[in-house]
Image (cartoon, rainbow, N blue to C red):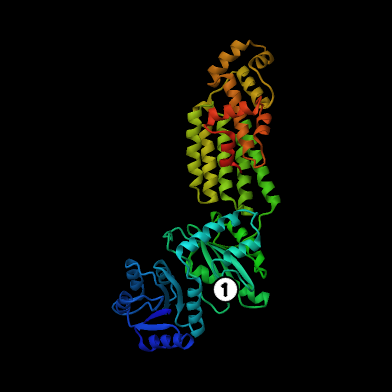
Amino acid sequence: MFRILVVDDEYPIREGLVHMITAEHPDFEVESAKNGLEALEKMDASAFGLVITDIRMPHMDGLELLEKMREKNISTGVIVLSSYDDYPFVRSAFKNDAVDYLLKTEVDSGKLLEAIENFRQKKRPVSDLHSLCQKLRGPLSSDLYKPADFCALLSSYGDFVPQNSYYCFVLKLSPDETAADSAPFLPLVDYAKAKFCLAIEERLYLGCVEIRQPSLLIQLQRQAAYNRQLQKYNAPSLLLYSDIRTDSLLLLDSLRLLYSCRNLDFYGITVHRAEHYPTAQEAQLKEYYLNLIDSFRSGAFDLAYTQIQDFFTYAARTLYPDIANLKAMCQNFCETAYSHTVPFDRDAYYQYTQEISALFQDSCRIASLQKCLTDTLKRLQQHPATCTRCSQRIAQAVSIIEKNYMEEITLSGVAQTLYISPEYLSRSFKKEVGSNFNAYLNNVRLQHALQLLKEPASRISEVAEKTGFQTPAYFSKCFKNTFGISPQEWKVKNSL
């Protein structure tokens, strides 16, 4: 038998709720308590499947009751029924494991009974829902999963698949809502029903709302109204929503789109309609990226600063959604500039890459990311090794390497081009550049190889050939000696 405990200090309301529930569900066993203390005593004496409680009560109010239940590890579900719709009350209730929050001024028998039924249908072990969230990450990140299989997966965990018109949303809670139990509040309204709201990542929830209205215009109005409720009661850092759908097989596509845009709060956005990122815009950003790489390879820092402004202006205007890739591009800019201005030293290079990686990862807004990049490049220009001027002939030797690294280059061949002896070139190169000729040549080739390896379709053998290495085996040997891992391992970790 399903047992419910109703807690309210006002007798007419308390007994009215008991009668309302038993009239519809005579098979339920419903008891009542006049405050939190009495409710706690009854829960200590016997188990209840659900508690419906008011907030303001003498001796022990509803929020204190929730805290005591948590301290005692009483896992009963709780629906809060209150006259207060302020944000602090709602958040306090949900932080203490409430499953729903209803306003007394709006509740009727239909809403209350629906809230009870929602709780009963969706009450599953926490481990089950955690398992579902883990399984959802694959379909959200890959195109290999079929929509029908996705719906079947959801259905195996509960009544999660919409049968009528619906839309999806992604809700990212504000940074101060970091507790693992800070689940979002989903309003219970006549015109819409939340099918699910699942924690995909920390503070990040994917949800689906079914809308009860055949008219598309009214559906859009009610979608906007529901979003205002979500924003009011959850204070999100980001709320994204999809188009209204009618076919459940499009559910996966909507959720994938939302998941791919989950970091748009990086641009200072709070509420936004999710949109597909066009392939043409992706190609345009890649063009900006490659032009900047060329400028750093040639040492054209003045031109690069102008290109950096264009790069970030475009990313901000188009709301480029892959923030992790954006940060990786910035790190690549600095690594390329470093490798083409400072004599190569493996330990110094690794230390530099670790420092800038941490700087970029900590950037939480596009303006701070742009400032971090320009400040890092300005410091690099002031590096003592960057300011050292080579003699004309050694500068020519370096230029030959930079322009022809993909060809067969030898010390004697470059010396012959410069009309000097190989011995003099070797000695002078080491003295002025800080590295011997072959080591510098391999470093240039390896730096270009790093950029090619980040391309998803690149092959190790093709990269070796394009960067001037005699064989893939020799390329792999040089790569591992320099970076400590094989080209394939590096590619897996760093592909764009």
Residue 162 location, quadrant:
bottom right
Give coordinates of residue 254: x percent, y percent. 63, 62
User: What secondary structure is found at the residue carrying circle 1?
Assistant: helix
Query: What count of labels does the image hold?
Result: 1
Which residue occupies 69% across, 47% down? 283
Q: Is residue 282 left or right of residue 435?
A: right
Q: Check disc 1 and give the amino acid type.
A: Ala
Q: Residue beneath label 1, please?
A: 225
**Between residues 76 and 221, which one lies in front from this camera angle?**
76
Give coordinates of residue 405: x percent, y percent. 66, 26
Give coordinates of residue 295: x percent, y percent. 64, 35
Vertical comparison of 231 with 141: above or below: below
Vertical comparison of 307 with 138: above or below: above
Vertical comparison of 84 with 386: above or below: below
Furthest toward the front, the residue is 1
Which residue occupies 34% across, 70% down? 69
Residue 422 location, quadrant:
top right
Q: Is residue 371 left or right of residue 461?
A: left
Query: What is the quadrant of the N terminus in the image?
Result: bottom left
Which residue occupies 51% across, 79% down? 114
The residue carrying pointer 1 sits among few (fewer than 14), some (14 to 19) or many (20 or more) residues within 10 Å by Cα, namely few
